[in-house]
Each structure stands twice: as structure tokens, then as C-alpha cells.
Image (spheres, rainbow, N blue to C red):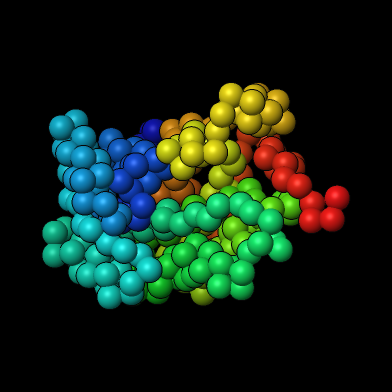
Amino acid sequence: MGILDLFRLDGKVAIITGAGRGIGAACAKAFAEAGARVVVAARTIEQIEAAAETIRAAGGTAIAVPCDVMKEEQLEALVKAALEAFGRIDIVVNNAGGSRPGPALHTSTADLVNAFRFNVGTAFALSRIAAPRMVETAGGGSIINISSVAGNIPSAGFAAYGTAKGALSMLTRELAQEFAPKIRVNAIAVGSTRTEALQTVLNAEIESQMVRLTPMGRLGEVEDISACALYLAAPASAYLTGDIIGVNGGLLSLNLPMPRAFG
């Protein structure tokens, strides 16, 4: 077996949430190119159908399953759909999540709880639901959580999002200990990546500032993240679990400075 064979996913089945666009869609495309059969999940049917069709048009295998990750019954149905279609589950990518930055004094307790539930609770729920079926049908597998550099670098304006992603990174480490040796659990600490979500806050001035504050001198692209996800999904990372890999251009401080509460 050559080294590149360790990056193949032939015969494996992957569930990816938030896969209608952005990082999730890029992961689905990468996994399919590596030979996996992919379950593309998100709330927007048109987006997941388009993502799945792109994979099929390139010769891959994909199905689109509508899923609101905030509803556990839909996560149960997602796992069931994957098993009915392909008979096994090897890989789960918990990509759905997010929260806009904002001042802590203008962030309600409900906002904080919702950010935690969306970014951490949903990943925990799908992992808990899928893990027994992964062991039962595939003998084990890999869970990949899409975290953020904001989860380990404190900064003004990120009390809700940063706290939630920090908790997701810790959940990754906890589940890695509990699910070993059958299931590996790792996360990617994503930096500022050019997605539709980031475009909502970007203008020329903000982008220039973010690029200037990033050691690698550019924003991330979704392919930067999907390449790392492929490594974590593939046999190449068979001895890696409980790790948080930073794919963030070398950031040691956040590149979107926000005002402090009291000057």
C-alpha cells in the first residue's frame, strides 16, 4: 500500500451536517472524490440537493437528507436514512453551527445558551446517536467536529461563540477518551475562511485588515478545511484522536478586533 492509499475512503460512508454550502459542501466533495458515499445534510433542501448533484455529476455517490440539527428526532432520522441507503456509517462531520460576534453586554443569557446548544449540543447529540451504529455496522470510525480558533483565543465580542466553540473542542477531547479505541474523535479549529457566512460581514476594509493580521497573509479557503477533514477521516490519521488541529493561517490572536466594553 502506498502512502496516498492511506487517504482513500473507498467503501466508507460519511454523514456531514451543514453540507449545503461552504465548509460542509467542500468536505462532502472531498470525501466523495476519495471514494466515500456521502450523506449531505442541512435544512435547505435546494442547497443539499445541489451539493449532492454536483457530487453525482462528478461520478461520486451522494444523497441529500433534510435535517434541522436542533431537533434530535431529525438527527435520529438522518442516521436512519444513512443506514437505509448505505448500510453503514464510518464518518460523521459535525459542521453545522455558528453565531455572530457581538458585545457581551448586549448578549442575553438566552443568546449564550442558544450558541452553546447550536454549536455543542447538536454535535453531542449526533455523535451520541451515531456512535453505536458506527461500531455496529463498520466496527468503528471517525467523528470530526468543526470548531474555531475563537474557541481557544479569547477576544472581545466572542463571549457566546468563543465559549461555545471552546466547549466543542473540550467535548471533542472528552468523547475521544470515551469512544477509544473504536471511534476516533478530533476537531478542526478553523480560522477566518471565505464562506457565504463570512461574506456577510466582509467589506474591502475589513478583509484587508483580516489579511494583514493573519500570518499566512490571506483568508482561508474551504478547501483548506476539507483537506484537513479528509486526513482526519482517512486511515492516514489512524493513530490520532482527541486532537484539535488548527487550520487558521497561524493566528495567535483573532483578526477581527472588536471594541471592549469599557474602553
Taking 133 as reference, is 56 above or below it?
A: above
Taking 149 as reference, is 224 above or below it?
A: above
Q: Residue at x 72, y 31 (%)?
A: 213
Quadrant, the N terminus: top left
Q: In the depicted view, which residue is nearer to us: 2 or 15?
A: 15
Inspect this view and state whether residue 107 appears: yes
Q: Quadrant of residue 257?
A: top right
Inspect this view and state whether residue 1 appears: no
Q: Residue at x 15, y 32 (%)?
A: 57
> How many numbered discs sit on the rendered protein?
0
Q: Residue at x 28, y 75 (%)?
A: 73
Tell me where residue 113 appears, x and y as whole percent. Answer: 55, 72
Tell me where residue 148 appears, x and y as whole percent. Answer: 58, 50
Tell me where residue 45 appears, x and y as whole percent. Answer: 21, 51
Q: Is residue 82 left or right of residue 215?
A: left
Q: Quadrant of residue 4?
A: top left
Tell me where residue 83 appears, x and y as whole percent. Answer: 19, 65
Q: Is residue 77 left or right of residue 208?
A: left
Q: Quadrant of residue 81?
A: bottom left
Taking 166 as reference, is 27 above or below it?
A: above
Q: In the depicted view, which residue is nearer to us: 15 or 256?
A: 256
Q: Residue at x 35, y 65 (%)?
A: 69
